[in-house]
Amino acid sequence: MISSRGVTKKFKDKIAVDNVSFQFKEGEIIGFVGPNGAGKTTTMRLFLGYLWPTTGQISIDGLNPISNRIEVLKKIGYLPENNPLYQEMRVKEYLQFIAEAKEDQNFSKIISQVGLEEVLNSKIEELSRGFKQRVGLAAAIIGDPQILILDEPTSGLDPIEQDKIKKLIKGLKKTIIFSTHILSEVEDVAGRIVIINQGKIVYDGKKPKGKGTVEKLFKRLIK
Amino acid sequence: MKTLYKKELNYYLNNPIGYIVVILFAIFANFLFVKDLFLVGSASMKSFFSLLPWLFLVFVPALAMRILSEEKRVNTIETLLTLPVSETQIVLAKFFTLLTLLIVALLLTTALPISLSILTRMYLSEIAVGYLGAVFLGSSFIALAMFFSVQTKNQVVAFLLAALTTFFLLVLSTDFTASVLPKTLQDFFSYFSPSYHLQNFIKGLIDFRSTLYFLSLTALFLFLTIVDLEKRK
């Protein structure tokens, strides 16, 4: 479903992603972990065609995210890092805008699924961080995309909100790639782990069984 | 594109900045007209239209400076560019939003010539062509200001670059340039000045070359804006 072959992304002289190759299958939940600046966000942006690889090829359902940008974006729901939203808009207005852009008017179910009923008429700038994150998640889910790419979906949230978002992600029957710094989150949600360090994949495989094993693996690989 | 246009227009309708800029423009523009009416004793709109490029020099960059730079600053550009919409749709939606606001601002200046035409003889068709020229002029300035807005995350920088470039384009056909440059060069440069081409419309002529000039200038800067947005660093 998603494949990457020898993908390298350079920003001037700095290599952000270095010769990365993998294949993600339909229905997999992939935890994408790595230290700050490891290349997680860059890799995710490459999947979306938001960035172009310097070398290598990416394919989403057989389509190139650069030459078939619109078709690829119809298949992907994306929650960017730091969740940039139009703060001056009301929640309903924002979701309506996203729904119209994705040509899907039937998003009332998503509102209740994500738990946004009580803030629908509030301005986004007035919302708590948790609600803002839910708005971003709802926007990603609208249009019923096959793939969800979530860049640090629980970043900056309190443990209760984190649990709510985790439950939501687990309940979505889709191919999901999510990046996080919280290793316990990967243990709870992901079925497969990709660990990236300094732009290189240092681990790609099944989630090890047992509590705390992901952290041990991470600490062993990232020194 | 309709969705994006609606979203952009709603921003200006729900935000004081749009109203402030449009109303300020209308006040200054109406003042220019009334000034000529009472001080010079002329009911002609020629001097109003001649001064319009200088008003647009501030008004258009003030309106357009945030249009893409703010999206870049708060990174909502990532939200936009990861939606299934093309860069061309994004740029055109923003362009038509700004053009709508410019037309609204110009409409706010039409009350005086219309009411005066009841009291005195005024050539309304000539005035209508003048307004058409003003729309063409405004659209080229909008495209230019959008191009500078996509270059930077800083609205003030976008404003200054757009205003400065517009200023240089306007200066090309002024008496000052005429006194400094040789006649052949002056003729050559003035052809590239928006004021030179606006003169035909002020006279009531829909000149094909001048129309083409404004449309080309608009298309060129819109194209450059789209290309910049398509660039993936």
Image: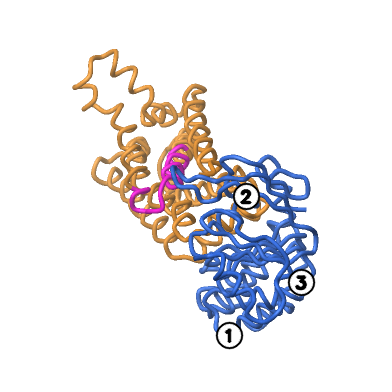
Chain colours: A blue, B orange
Q: Which residue is mark 3?
A: A172
Q: Earlier in the sequence, mark 3 or mark 2?
A: 2
Q: Which residues are magenta?
A: B140-159
- The answer to whether residue B195 is above or below residue A197 is above
Q: Helix, strand or loop at disc 2? A: strand
Image coords of residue A130 (percent x, y): 57, 79
Asked if residue A212 lies left or right of residue B175, the reply is right
Nearer to the camera, B192 or A14? A14
**Do marks 1 and 2 share a chain?**
yes
In the rendered image, residue A147 lying in the magenta stretch gets the answer no
Give, as a three-letter code, the residue at label 3.
Answer: Leu
Residue found at x 30% / y 44%: B37
Classed neighbour count for the residue bearing mark 2: other residues with Cα under 10 Å, few (<14), some (14–19), many (≥20)? some
Q: Kindly identify which numbered label has been placed on residue A159.
A: 1
Q: Is residue B147 visible?
A: yes
Of residues B69 and A150, the one drawn nearer to the viewer in this rendering: A150
* x and y, in percent, of residue A59 in the image: 72, 46
- Provide residue B31's location: percent of width, then percent of height: 31, 50
| x then y, percent, for residue A20 | 62, 50
Q: Which residue lies at the image location 78% right of the left edge and 50% below the top edge?
A: A61
| Magenta span contains residue B152 | yes
Mark 3–mark 2 Cα distance, whole angstroms, equals 27 Å
* Vertical order, B50 against A52 (above or below): above
The residue mark sitting in front, 3 or 1, is 1
Residue that label 2 marks: A20
Identify the residue at image location x=57%, y=78%. Answer: A122
Residue contact at pointers 3 and 2, CB within 8 angstroms: no
Chain of the residue under label 3:
A
